[in-house]
Image (cartoon, rainbow, N blue to C red):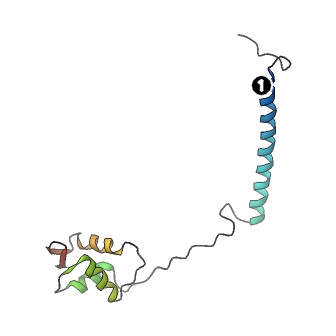
Amino acid sequence: MARPPSPARRPDSVRTQERKLDRLAARVGDLEIQMRALIASAGRRGGRRGAKPRKRTLFKNSMTLTEALRKLLKGRTMRVVEAAQAVQKAGYRTISKSFQIQVGGILNNGAFKRVGVGRYTAK
């Protein structure tokens, strides 16, 4: 097995790359020290600087969506969109962006009777 060449015999490109590697290693060490100091001074671990906690208003409804739909559809037949609007008018509060999809899923899960194309009633 051949011995590696001595440092004096190494090509210039290898010596240049070794110097770059040494400088980068020193820079990484400096950055690690700065990061530890920032984390310690902030008194927390990570996170965005100045980030505010996200507020999400969740509503407490007196009954579940299934119960509200059952009460609404008792003796009536409605489409999904109509049922979603009517249940909200009746006082069911939500901030869902896909509320009509939720209502459609509940109406289609077997707790309600499908009486026509897109029309449902309570069982």
Quarter of the figure with the N terminus: top right
Whether residue 77 sits left or right of residue 81 in the image: it is left
Location of residue 27 with respect to 34 vertically, above or below: above
Q: Secondary structure at mark 1?
A: helix
Residue at the limit of the structure toward the bottom, as seen here: 90
User: In front: 12, or 50?
Assistant: 12
Q: Give the image location of residue 112, x and y in percent.
A: 20, 75
Residue at the limit of the structure toward the right, as seen here: 8
Q: Give the image location of residue 38, x and y in percent.
A: 77, 60
Residue at the limit of the structure toward the left, as seen here: 115
Location of residue 17 with respect to 60 vertically, above or below: above
Residue at the limit of the structure toward the front, as seen here: 13
Check disc 1: other Cα within 10 Å, few if <14, some if 14-19, many if 20+: few
Residue that mark 1 sits on: 14
Whether residue 42 sits left or right of residue 99 in the image: it is right
Residue occupying image coordinates x 80% and y 29%: 16
Quarter of the figure with the C terminus: bottom left
Residue occupying image coordinates x 33% and y 88%: 89
Whether residue 25 sits left or right of residue 77 in the image: it is right
Residue occupying image coordinates x 37% and y 72%: 98
Q: Give the image location of residue 7, x and y in percent.
A: 84, 20
Whether residue 103 sits left or right of residue 112 in the image: it is right
Q: Amino acid at mark 1?
A: Val
Q: Give the image location of residue 41, x and y in percent.
A: 78, 64
Residue 113 figure quarter? bottom left
Residue 106 figure quarter? bottom left
